[in-house]
Image: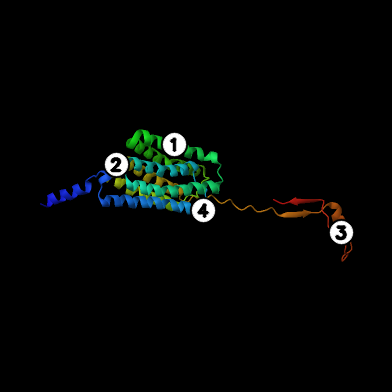
Amino acid sequence: MIDSAAAHAAHAVLATYPVNAAPLWVDALASVAGGVGIASQWPQVWRLWRSRQHAGLSTLSCVLNLLTPFCWFTYGLVQGSAVQILLNGVALVGGAGVLLGLVVRARLRPREWLPALLSGAAVVITVAAVGGVPFAGALASVVTLSMALPQVWLLLRGRVRGTLDARGVSRPRWLMSAVCNTGWVSYAFLVADPAIGITAGSMVVSSVLVLVLCRSSAPAVEPAVTAPALRLVPSPELTGKLAAKPAGAAGVSLHTDRIACSP
């Protein structure tokens, strides 16, 4: 009897559900994960707009950061998932705030970010319209997987070269990203959606990598340079004049033929 009850409980835990007929608690898990994901954008928005810091941010990563919720929003449309439509629609606002903040603070030219954004959006719409759910999900996974890679590469290169300055990278953003994607991994398991599961799992790894690379990333402080002391070296002629002048005499102006800097 006890074994039967335990088996039933295990089956209830390991059961999977169709995404459009999942229990309320499964949708609640997705909502919590999505809510954390939405909130994760705003520490970066704050850092850009309020703290005015952008050092260490990858432009391509910020473009992909906006395309990622756009991909999943489109995926939710073709799949008929109201949760994904709602959450990723709101996430688009945060992604736009991050990209716009970088454009303003770093004074990026349109050619540095706009072509990538427009061409990426066009590809997403075309793939979703032609390929349907499988291709839209695959593309969303690829874009999400690619989103953090330019950021990781930029930080890694700076770390290797010893020139890392990541003052513009928000650590809370990536910590919340790791928590968010852990929730999406659980949701993907429950609805048997490998596209979400593989992508979210990879994002957990990428988020942790960014956090590790950003640790102690303040640029090295250059040692203070002390100006050399100035030593006045009078010419022999002036030395002779001073020696010939009676004590207490006034009106002798000091002129030097050269000024030498002692090391």
Label 1: state its secondary structure: helix
Q: Which residue is mark 1?
A: 122
Disc on the earlier residue, 3 or 1: 1
Task: Name the kind of residue labelled 3 in the image.
Answer: Ala
Which label lies toward us, 1 or 2?
A: 1
Disc on the earlier residue, 3 or 4: 4
Residue 88 screen position, x and y as percent: 38, 47
Task: Name the kind of residue labelled 1 in the image.
Answer: Ala
Label 2: state its secondary structure: loop
Q: Is 68 in front, or is 258?
A: 68
In the rendering, which numbered label is found on residue 193? Answer: 2
Figure coloring: rainbow
Residue located 41% across and 45% down the image: 209
Disc on the earlier residue, 2 or 4: 4
Question: Can residue 116 be seen here?
Answer: yes
Q: Which residue is mark 3?
A: 243
Task: Name the kind of residue labelled 2 in the image.
Answer: Asp
Question: Can residue 175 be seen here?
Answer: no
Reply above or below: 146 against 46. Answer: above
Label 4: state its secondary structure: helix
Residue 24 screen position, x and y as percent: 26, 51
In the rendering, which numbered label is found on residue 49? Answer: 4
Contact between labelled residues 1 and 3, with CB atoms less than 8 Å apart:
no
